[in-house]
Each structure stands twice: as structure tokens, then as C-alpha cells.
Amino acid sequence: VQLVESGGGLVQAGGSLRLSCAASGRISSYPAMGWFRQAPGKEREFVAAIRWSRGDTYYADSVKGRFTISRDNAKNMVFLQMNSLKPEDTAIYYCAADEYYRSAYSAETDFGAWGQGTQVTVSS
């Protein structure tokens, strides 16, 4: 499976951005998709995840109420709507795919396919 992110950019604090992830290849073998981010000098961390079939969603506490993950099954695309952005949201955002059914999704090591990432910068 191939994953390509887009939609990153520079935005002021309080603003919004919408990230997109286009999936191609054997995406039907991957029940869930996720977004992770890595800020400078920090480890990559979980942001949100969604199941393709039922649309169940999972969020990190730091983004609950501000970010929304969604998917378009017909287009094999996953989105991350980010509102009320803060400078601490600045990071490279990665789209990822998990090939297993799990009770929940948040562990980086569970996701076996990754995109190249898209930069999000939030200015204060």
C-alpha cells in the first residue's frame, strides 16, 4: 500500500488546516488508518485513527475536541480536520495504515505502512 499526505502548511494559532491522505494499492488489507506527528526533537506520537468499515475513531487526549478524522471509502482517502491549532501542534504529520483488526488503535508499532509526511507549522 502507498500513502501520500497533502494539505500541510503555515497557519496562525487558532486557525484550521485539513490534511488528506490518499491510499493506493492493497488498501483493503488494512482495516484502519491513522495520523501520527513528530515535532522537532521529539518522538513520533499518535494523533488519531479510524476504521475503514465502521468509521470508529480514536484520538489522543491532546487533540480531542479540536481534530476530526474522517474517511472516504469510495476514494480511499483519509482526512484530518484540525481546528483551533496551537503552536505545539507544529510537527510533521504522517498518515499510516494498520493491517490488523484491534480493539483500539494508537500504538505506532501497530502501523506497518507509512507516508512521507507533510509539514504543519502553527505560528503564535
Image: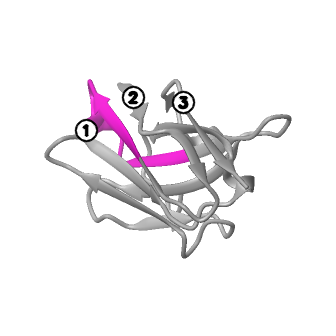
**Is 67 in front, or is 15?**
15
Mark positioned earlier in the residue sequence (2 or 1): 2
When the figure is inspected, residue 111 is found, relative to residue 13, above or below; the finding is above
Range of the magenta residues?
Answer: 19-35
Quadrant for residue 14, please give it: bottom right
Q: Is residue 102 depicted above or below 63 in this figure?
A: above
Queried whether the magenta region covers residue 29, the answer comes back as: yes
The part of the image, by quadrant, that contains residue 7 is top left
Q: How many marks?
A: 3
Quarter of the picture holding the C terminus: bottom right
Q: Secondary structure at mark 3?
A: loop
The quadrant of the rendering that contains the N terminus is: top left
Residue drawn at x 75%, y 40% as measured from the top left? 39
Q: Secondary structure at mark 1?
A: helix
Residue 82, percent across and down? 50, 59
| Residue position for label 3 | 117
Query: Dot 1 corresponds to which residue?
Result: 28
Report the residue marked by disc 2.
3
